[in-house]
Image (tube, rainbow, N blue to C red):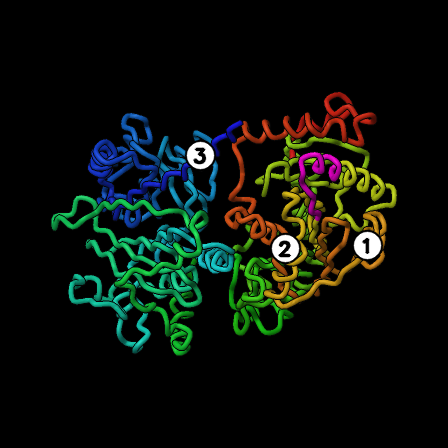
Amino acid sequence: MASPAPAPAPCPAPRPRILLAGDPMGRLHLLFKRVTSLNQSTGPFDALFCVGQFFSANANANANDLELEEYVQGRAAVPIPTYFTGAYGASTAAASQLLSSAATLTGRAFKPDGIQICPNLYWLRGSAKFSLRGLSVVYLSGKASDQRATAYTLDDIDALRALADDPGVVDLFLTYPFLYSLSFTHVSACVGLTNGADTSDAPPQVTDPSGCDPLIAELVAQIKPRYHIAGTKNVFYAREPYTNEGAVHVTRFIGLATVGNKDKQRFIHAISPTPAASMSAADIGARPPNTTESPYRNMARAQNLDDTKESSRHNSIEHETQYWRYDAPNKRQKKGAQAQGRLLCFKFTSSASCPNSHKCKFTHDPEAREHYMRNVCFDFLNKGNCERGADCKFGHSLSDDSASVSRSTFSARRPESSCWFCLSSPDVESDLITSLGENYYCALAKGPLVQNHVLLVPIEHSPNTLIMTAEAEKELQMYKNALTKYFDKQEKVVIYFEYAFQHNRHANLQVVPIPASKACHVEKIFNLASDRLGFSFSALNPEGDSTNGRKELRSQFDGKSSMFYVELPGNKILVHSVEDNDKFPVQFGREVLAGLLGTPDRADWRKCKLPKEEEMEMVDAFKAGFSSFDPTTAQVNLGEENPMLNQKLF
């Protein structure tokens, strides 16, 4: 009998096809006419990214005079999904009013990939990272400016610095300003990207230092995108690819001219890059023959530019008075103390953790965090004063009396009513709950790392699972045993992990099923990741059962410190005690498993959120499969005896 023919190899996913455009300057009819023509002749294209001045230069325009109004009101259609950065141009006020009104009336909320202004049109604001057809896209929407409406904030810059530490390769980085602002051969020049390349054919605008932004250069050097796209002073310029410090891949810079410019410079360009997440190591590391050295290779030695850089940052955006990072007084004890000395990390102060981990350049001050948790104003902690005046609802003294007054007028800084996990909260998404017990409930994770990624969540508002009662611990063990058996039927093993840090809002034990074939690699990859961050795990229960392992773990936890632990297949537990001044990444467990599974782009749950329809399909499928294993089935009728499930979870 002839053996069956081998199954054909799956066809690789088609590469995304992307259009790039320079400053539209409000000429949307011309831009979209050109896009429609290209889409019909050489398309289809998946998306259009616009960088530069999007709004009209007509200072006297009102909302009704703008071409944008045609699309917002539905009288004209945007041909393909279009993403634009920033609010620039003389007509910014009129356009912002139009867009804000449209967004409010339609209830379109802000997402990492933008506010949907109308069908196929998205306004990218601030800075963020999102995925499009497998491509990792990062953007900075704004420019160095003394105008509030057009300037990026320190918040935006710091968020991108944190993103630079994320695993994986960024495919596209979108910015507005041309970045030829830092010279790494001599300080006074503005060579920038022309450094190390043959500039004989570069247009004069490329080497002109006016309008340059040193922070963009710094961010590009840190993020190391495969493509950097920017507006370019009304010229088209595609630089030779260049190498990156500490990375194997090269970066290509593409600058685009103004839409409809009189010099006939190219304002629209097409690319079709393979997402880095699906490329082989050899393909990512390939270098074209014309590759040059990195224009940022000497940035680390340009320390004498630091003072100038800090001055530029504060001169351009000090007016924002955002509550992220300010100059902090050396002693936070006197009202009216002048801002000088340290910079305070808002991430750590507000959440006891920092996404920048060990690379954070700002102060992680436990004392400041204690005052912050007592509702002391963050601006006051940093600057010694608060510019919000009577509008600020927080305390402006380090005394307990002031904090008490603030607490009475503003309740608590982190009220349980706004907790994503409390069943009594209006923010809870109950439709993700799959099982409800007396002390715990099981819910599908929002933005799951893998299919059937679930959470075991205490019903009580508790910062971690290790301080729950013995009765609650018994129920948790019942859930764990049931989930282990359920996933075993699917030839999967389960990884349980929790970051039990002292000031967590609401505990959740992460339950991540992985293929059984990868079980032998889990301990190794966690140890490799810990080595990279400069710490080591201790091991508990190497040969015992799960109950004894949790019992030993609970006995070691004093409830006053922080701890990360992960339970491996076979019930061995790896434990790391986190000191108060340690900069431990909150998403550590998820990032490690994303690397193990070869899906680094799924390390951040916010990038993995699903449409509501898909969430409900996954919930229904999980309930159907888990029902025969559910330890609470005989105790609880989810639909009838628990009216709180008519609310929302997460």
- Tag 3 or tag 1, which sits nearer the N-term? 3
Position of 117 with respect to 429 (left or right) is: left
Q: Which circle, 1 or 3, is nearer the viewer?
A: 3
Nearest the camera: 285 or 402?
A: 285
Q: With respect to residue 326, does 6 lie above or below?
A: above
Q: Are marks 2 and 1 in contact (CB under 8 Å)?
A: no
Would you say residue 486 sits in the magenta stretch?
A: yes
Amino acid type assigned to the residue bearing label 2 in the image: Ser
| Residue sitting at x 72%, y 34% | 486
Residue under circle 3?
8
Q: Are marks 3 and 2 in contact (CB under 8 Å)?
A: no
Nearest the camera: 147 or 518?
A: 518
- Tag 1 or tag 2, which sits nearer the N-term? 2
Residue 404 visible in rendering: no
**Circle 2 Cα neighbour tier, 10 Å, few/some/many (<14 / 14–19 / ≥20):** some
Residue under circle 2?
351
Position of 435 with respect to 311 (left or right) is: right
Q: Which circle, 2 or 1, is nearer the viewer?
A: 1
Residue 562 visible in rendering: yes
**Circle 3 Cα neighbour tier, 10 Å, few/some/many (<14 / 14–19 / ≥20):** few
Q: Which residues are magenta?
A: 483-496
Amino acid type assigned to the residue bearing label 1 in the image: Glu
| Residue sitting at x 65%, y 58% | 524
User: Residue 352: horizontal and vertical position, in percent?
Assistant: 65, 58
Quadrant of residue 559 within the rendered picture? bottom right
